[in-house]
Image: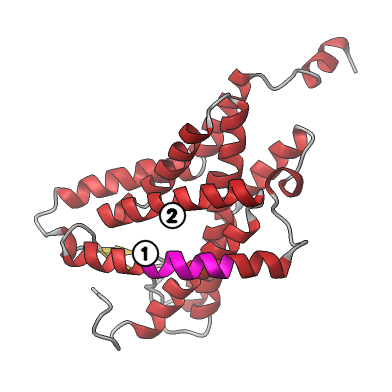
Amino acid sequence: MTTASTEASARPLTRRLLGAELLIVLGLSLGASGVAALISFAGSLTEPLALGKQVASLNASRAPGRPWLDLAWQLYYIGRGLMPVVLVGYLLIREGSSLRNALGFDLTRKLSDLGRGALVAAGIGGSGLLLYLAAQAGGANLTVAPSGLPEVWWRIPVLLLSAWQNAVLEEVVVLGYLLRRLQQLGWGWPAALIASSVLRGSYHLYQGVGGLVGNMVMGAVFCLLYRRWGRVMPLVAAHGLIDTVAFVGYALLAGHVSWLPTP
């Protein structure tokens, strides 16, 4: 190995490099989703149809009428959605740490993490549903359709995979990784909490004002709990349970109960 290559491999992670790395990771993941959500919301505001009568579809069919091709696309996008987590894991290993050591992303405390997550999910999920129903009824939110998949055998398994992919991606990137990098960049705790919460709300803006505000509040709560517990896994569990109930519950209840808004 030459002297030049040795010096390059030994270069410390300066604030400038850390900042560039953070922007790249967000630009390849949820930061880009935030920009897309803003554009989508601008489009919804300029539609002649009222927000409450518009629909935000999640987990939509990607090949209508062709279930096996649709399944292949669903699995492809779920796998691709986890690549930023793989990237974060690689970057942490390069700095001499890991997802486990730096963020508490592991399965060493399964029962404890699941128990904490279930309690958080019960509190956040119930209040979040009430906020959504109020915002949608008030015309500040689109009608969210968490499942647009056909009634085929793989619908529920794909919804479960989608729910937990969302949970892993968001909590690793927007909670653990973002807060770690902002701390390394010299940000104070209140500023980092606000940044994480605003980012979480931003990529839900496509749903409307209710999606923005509700997820910002959820983000602030998750930041506080992460700071207290030092592990992202309880929050991954909470998020996964919330999305599981939302996705699977909608698939099973839509059209069968009067209180659930549907397209």
Q: Where is residue 207 in the image (x, y as percent from the top left)?
A: 30, 57
**Amino acid under label 1?**
Gly
Magenta span dominant secondary structure: helix
Picture layout, residue 213 above or below residue 24 = below
Q: Residue furthest top?
A: 3
Q: Residue furthest right?
A: 1
In the image, taking residue 109 as reference, residue 206 lies left or right, namely left
In the image, taking residue 164 as reference, residue 66 lies left or right, namely left
Residue at the (82%, 16%) spot, across then down:
5
Picture layout, residue 238 above or below residue 85 = below
**Disc 1, SS:** helix
Q: In which quarter of the image is residue 110?
A: bottom right
Q: Name the residue under label 2.
A: 218
Residue at the (79%, 34%) spot, across then down:
96
Q: Nearer the viewer, residue 42 or 98?
A: 98
Marks 1 and 2 in Cβ contact (< 8 Å):
yes
Q: Give the range drawn in magenta.
A: 117-128
Q: Position of residue 204 (x, y in %)?
A: 36, 52
Q: Name the residue under label 1.
A: 128
Residue at the (68%, 46%) spot, across then down:
103
Tell me which label, 1 or 2, sits earlier in the chain.
Answer: 1
The image quadrant where one finds the C terminus is bottom left
Picture layout, residue 202 above or below residue 135 = above
Please rate how many residues cluster around mark 1, counting C-alpha atoms within 10 Å: few if below 14, some from 14 to 19, many from 20: many
